[in-house]
Amino acid sequence: MYEKILIANDGSDGAAKALAVAIKMAHRPKVKLDMVCVEEMPYAPATIDEVVEERLEENHRFEKVIEHARLQARAAHVKFETHVVAGHAVPSIIEFIERGGFDLLVIGYMGHSAIYNRLIGSTTDRLVELAPCHVLVVK
Amino acid sequence: MENVWLVSAVWLGLALLASVISIRVAMSVALVEIMVGAVAGNTIGLNLTEWVNFLAGFGAILLTFLAGTEIDSRVVRKHFWSSMSIGVVGFVAPYLGVLLYARYGIGWSWPQAQIAGISLSTTSVAVVYAVMVETGFNKSEMGKIILAACFINDLGTVLALGIVFAHFDYWLALFGAVTAAALWMLPRFAPWFFTKVGHRVSEPETKFISLVLLGLGGLASVAGSEAVLPAYLVGMALAPAFLADPELPHRMRIIAFTILTPFYFLKAGSLVDFQAVIASAGLIAVFLAIKMATKFVGILPLTKAFQFEAREGMYTTLLMSTGLTFGTISALFGLTNHIIDQQQYTILVTAVIGSALVPTLIAQRWFQPTFKPIEDDIGPATPSKEEA
């Protein structure tokens, strides 16, 4: 079965559910669970400070998310590693999978309105489409 | 009679809308403000009153000043020749390329062609920095050289905007002399003054800097120059003081981005004419293509000369083809001073917006260099610790 599992966590309720499932799946010998959080970088910023501030804000947000995830993983005795990367969610996660050689990506489902999905498309849809490994979407 | 409160409510409502959208779609608030301004300008119509123009103009001055303060002179000194040559060529090549095309290709007058060349000669330091952070290049020597080159490139743009249309008379000499004296005194006086007055709610530091910027800006206007020129130079002069005390520029940015720059970017967008965008779509694409092509002609050989890898060279060149703030400032200068008309303004600003997005997307999609540290080390929430 899967030995290198990656959970992508954006701090949402859906991601929290996905983390719980991923921890259960990783609760076996020789399985390692990694968690990646993506600091969203603004497209076309006007000042460097805008970029710096955005990163600090994201970091602050992910502090709690990471701490909470670590506690859960520790309680479940799961081998666990956390990562924060800067970029845009879909390409950053895809690249992270490629570089890390993960065999399963676990993500939470986030519902959007029909019009949002039609116009913009969800991150979940694009990850399912582009990920170079199996993807588990937790709802 | 104009209802000031209702008019200002409309403007600030649009600014708030832009902020919310920018957070939602993770896009620069400046770019979203331009887009929101364009939609509002083409639908409800925005009222460009005297006080709106003042706030917008002050916003542009403060934005330029803050851009100048982000220069790390140590990096420029350390990588002087590489950053200087890449930066100068990065300015000159697109400036000449666009200027000559506008003049001889489509028959714009010399002043109009100058505005086109200046508007599309820029590089967006912030866009480059954001991409650098994503790729981890901001920590590498190459990344520092590129950033320093971007500052030099923008300095060229600001100098051109401030000099090309100036009246060469006594007023310009006076403006030059006063600016030179200010640039000599400020790095000595300002840190002392800031220490004396301290950080206070009444913001004496911000008032002092605003006084300097508005005073020099006023002299620049009398001399037929542009107020953003002294603003950028004063920013550069005060950069070491601001780097030593990041709290002050942060507070100034809050003031600028809350109440001033939204007026500037919304105004810049509101003057974009959608019909002209459609009618001139081909020309916009040509201008964008010329900007990118001339950046390639100028910068790519230099990256080879400075022994960048081929992929790194392409990546650097594409990043230096970006632009936003100074491009819009230059185009708006042309429109405000009746050098270009609204259709020409629309063409230039749309090409500038395109240059904020297109080169970055190409660079990241096809030319991202192989070096990329996965982890990031800013702040406390970026660990990579294994736990069992």
Image: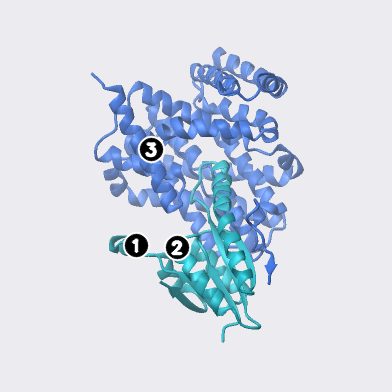
Give how far apart the Cα atoms at labels 2 and 3 are. 30 Å
Asked which quadrant contains residue B149, the reply is top right
In what element is the residue under mark 2?
helix
The tag earlier along the polypeptide, 1 or 2, is: 2
Q: Amino acid at mark 3?
A: Ala
User: Who's cyan, chain-wise?
Assistant: A
**Which mark's residue is nearer the viewer, 1 or 3?**
1
Dot 3 crowding, Cα within 10 Å, few <14, some 14–19, many 20+: many
Q: Cα distance, mark 1 to mark 2?
A: 14 Å
**Mark 1 or mark 2, whichever is nearer to me:** 2
Where residue B301 sits, quadrant-wise, is: bottom right
Is residue B319 in view?
yes
The structure residue drawn at horizontal position 55% and vertical position 79%, both measured from the top left corner, is A25
The numbered mark 3 sits on a residue in which chain? B
Residue depicted at x 65% and y 52%: B378
Are the residues under marks 1 and 3 on the same chain?
Answer: no
Q: Which callout, 2 or 3, points to the residue nearer the camera?
A: 2
Residue designated by label 2: A13
Q: Nearer the viewer, residue A44 or B305?
A: A44
Q: Residue at x 43, y 65 (%)?
A: A123
* Image quarter in which the N terminus of chain A is found: bottom right
Disc 3: which residue: B15
Q: Nearer the viewer, residue B151 or B279?
A: B151
